[in-house]
Amino acid sequence: MALPPVLVSLGTAIASASPIGLAQTPPTTTDPTTAAGVALIAAFVLIVYGSSVAFSVLLGAAVLGTSKLFGSGTYVPTVERLMRDGPVRSAAIGLAALVGGAIGTFLLVIVLLFAVELGAPEPLPMAIVIPFVAGTAFVYAAVTVGTIALGSVLLRRFGEGEPNDWLALAVGSLVVNVPGVNLLVAPPLTCVAAGAMIDERWRAWRDRGGRRDSLARSESEPSTDG
């Protein structure tokens, strides 16, 4: 006597759900090689991130320390204010300076190599080290100032009052070195910071020149005291 199809289907389902049926199902296991590879990649990313943050903090400490030691400590806040008040102007100045510096360095190399071909001393091309080192230091300083400015913006958004430069350095370093974020944030931030640094120097030079002219005019005017 044949069983109804409904009973046959029900018996099959019960058998597959029984301990014997479950025991026949092969267990799913995670490949230990894959897990080890993922852990190794995660550890490498964390090491690189931590090293980048530490380097940014050390570089920023040097910039802030130099600003407070040889100046009034207002250089970084002044540059940050210029970045906030005129980001487009600062970005344009910074991009022009960075591109112009790279082109000028390349042309200088060509000129020095050509001079050696004409009989100049062979060590002459080593002079390119001076502008290269100066340009690299300027870029690193721009990156550092931009990092501090980013940290200050975040602290102002989520806090009250004027942020501390050292705390802004720490916050900015943690954010700007996040993998992926650094590729999106660092280039424009560097351009804006570089332009603001150049703008700050130009304004300081212009103000000093104006004060000298004013002092010279006041000294040249005849005294009205009787």
Image: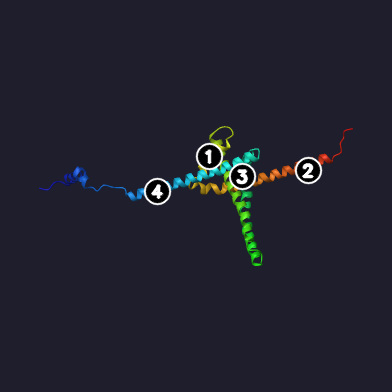
Q: To which residue does mark 4 refer?
A: 40
The relative height of residue 166 versus residue 124 in the rendered view (above or below) is above
Disc 4 residue type (three-letter): Leu
Q: In front: 110, or 224?
A: 110
Q: Quadrant of residue 6?
A: top left
Residue 170's label in the rendered image is 1
Q: To which residue does mark 2 refer?
A: 213
Q: To which residue does mark 3 refer?
A: 87
Q: Secondary structure at mark 4?
A: helix
- The residues tagged by marks 4 and 1 sit, at their Cα atoms, a distance apart of 27 Å
Task: Please name the residue shown 42% across and 46% down the image.
Answer: 43
Mark 1 crowdedness (10 Å alpha carbons): few <14, some 14-19, many ≥20: many
Q: Are marks 3 and 2 in contact (CB under 8 Å)?
A: no
Disc 1 residue type (three-letter): Ala
Going from N to C along the chain, the mark reached first, 3 or 1, is: 3
Residue 52's label in the rendered image is none
State the image coordinates of residue 165 (x, y, percent, origin top left). Answer: 58, 37
- The residues tagged by marks 1 and 2 sit, at their Cα atoms, a distance apart of 42 Å
- The residues tagged by marks 3 and 2 sit, at their Cα atoms, a distance apart of 31 Å
Going from N to C along the chain, the mark reached first, 3 or 4, is: 4
Going from N to C along the chain, the mark reached first, 4 or 1, is: 4
Going from N to C along the chain, the mark reached first, 1 or 2, is: 1
